[in-house]
C-alpha cells in the first residue's frame, strides 16, 4: 500500500474527515512538483527528496490550508506555531545527514518541536529511531493523531520541555530543533553522541537575528560549531503547557 493510501485508510477507520477531495487525487502530482522545485533549488539529497515525495504534507495541515500544502511556504498549525517551509525542512534534514561520519545511516535522532508531526514523519523514513518532543499538549495530541498510521517502534512522541533533550534515550546521532532560543541548551550538547550532529536555529549577535547552527561532536569528544544562513523559526519556550492557550 502506498503511504498516502495507508494514511487515508487510517483516517477513515478513525472516522476522521479526509482532506477535501480535489487535492486528494492531485496530491502526488503536487508533491512531485514540490520535490522537483527543491531539487532545482539545490537540494541534492536523494533520500530527503524521496521522503518529501512520500509523506502527504496536506494531511498535516488545517483543511482550510490544504491548497497551499505543496507550496514552499510555512503554514500556521495553531497556537501561534507553524509547520516549516519545505525548503528549510529539506535543508535541515540534509545538513543532519552530512555528519562527520555521515557514511553511517542515522541511528537515534531527537527532534525538538514535533508541531503537527510532518518533519517527524520524514525523519521516520531517514533514521532508525526517532524521539520527538513537544511542549504544547494540543499539538502533541494533534501529531499523535496525524502520525497514527506510522506510529511504530521507530517513532516515539514525547510531551515534555525539549530544552532538556530526552535523557532516557541519549545519546543521539542527530538532534534537530524546529524552534530557536538565545543559545543551544547544554542538555542537547550533553546528549549528542560522538560523531553526532545537531542542527538548530539559534540567535546570533545581539539584534535577535536567527541562523541555522550546526554543532558536531567529533570522535575525540570535542565540539565544532558552524553557522549557516539566516532563518526565522518560532521561539524555543520553557515548560510544558496543556492549557490550550500558548
Ligand atoms: N517540526 C514541526 C514544526 C513545528 S514548529 C512540524 O513539522 O510541524 C516548532 C514547535 O516547537 C512548536 O510546536 C512549539 O510548540 C515547539 N516548541 C517550542 N519550544 C519547545 C520546547 N522547549 N520543547 C518542545 N517543543 C517546543
Image (cartoon, grey):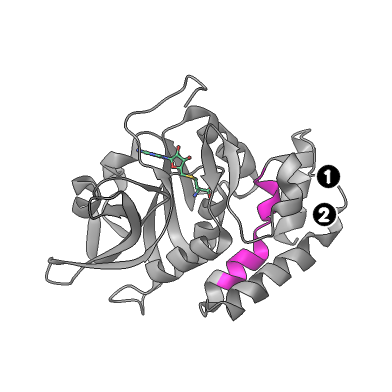
Up the image or down, 101 lies above or below 18; here it is below
Magenta span includes 52? yes
Furthest toward the top, the residue is: 243
Q: What stretch is highlighted in magenta?
A: 49-61
**Mark identifier at residue 23:** 2
For ligand 1, give the image quadrant: top left
* Quarter of the image with the N terminus in it: bottom right
**Mark identifier at residue 20:** 1
Residue density around tag 2, few if under 14, some if 14–19, many if 20 or more, within 10 Å: some
Residue 173 visible in the displayed image: yes
Up the image or down, 88 lies above or below 152; here it is below
Residue 3 in which image quadrant:
bottom right
Residue drawn 66% across the image and 76% down it: 36
Q: Is the magenta stretch mostly helix, strand or loop?
A: helix
Residue 70 in which image quadrant:
bottom right
Instruction: Please state if 228 lies on the left or on the right of 94 as rendered.
Output: left
Residue 6 visible in the displayed image: no
Depth order, front residue of 161/147: 161
Amino acid at each position: 500500500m502506498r503511504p498516502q493510501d495507508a494514511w487515508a485508510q487510517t483516517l477513515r477507520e478513525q472516522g476522521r474527515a479526509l482532506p477535501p477531495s480535489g487535492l486528494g487525487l492531485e496530491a502526488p502530482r503536487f508533491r512531485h512538483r514540490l520535490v522537483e522545485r527543491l531539487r532545482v533549488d539545490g537540494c541534492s539529497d536523494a533520500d530527503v527528496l524521496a521522503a518529501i515525495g512520500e509523506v502527504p504534507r496536506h494531511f498535516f495541515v488545517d483543511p482550510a490550508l490544504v491548497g497551499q500544502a505543496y507550496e514552499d511556504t510555512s503554514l500556521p498549525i495553531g497556537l501561534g506555531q507553524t509547520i516549516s517551509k519545505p525548503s528549510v525542512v529539506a535543508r535541515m534534514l540534509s545538513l543532519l545527514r552530512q555528519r562527520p561520519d555521515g557514511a553511517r545511516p542515522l541511528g537515534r535522532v531527537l527532534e525538538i518541536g514535533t508541531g503537527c508531526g510532518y518533519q517527524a514523519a520524514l525523519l521516520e523514513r531517514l533514521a532508525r529511531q526517532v524521539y520527538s518532543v513537544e511542549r504544547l499538549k494540543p499539538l502533541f495530541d494533534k501529531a499523535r493523531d496525524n502520525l497514527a498510521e506510522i506510529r511504530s517502534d521507530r517513532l516515539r512522541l514525547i510531551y515534555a520541555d525539549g530544552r532538556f533533550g530526552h535523557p532516557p534515550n541519549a545519546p543521539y546521532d542527530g538532534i534537530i530543533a524546529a524552534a530557536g532560543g538565545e543559545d543551544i541548551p547544554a542538555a542537547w550538547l550533553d546528549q549528542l553522541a560522538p560523531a553526532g550532529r545537531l542542527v538548530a536555529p539559534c540567535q546570533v549577535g545581539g539584534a535577535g537575528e536567527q541562523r541555522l547552527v550546526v554543532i558536531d561532536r567529533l570522535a575525540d569528544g570535542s565540539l565544532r560549531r558552524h553557522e549557516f544562513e539566516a532563518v526565522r523559526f518560532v521561539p524555543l519556550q520553557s515548560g510544558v503547557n496543556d492549557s490550550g492557550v500558548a
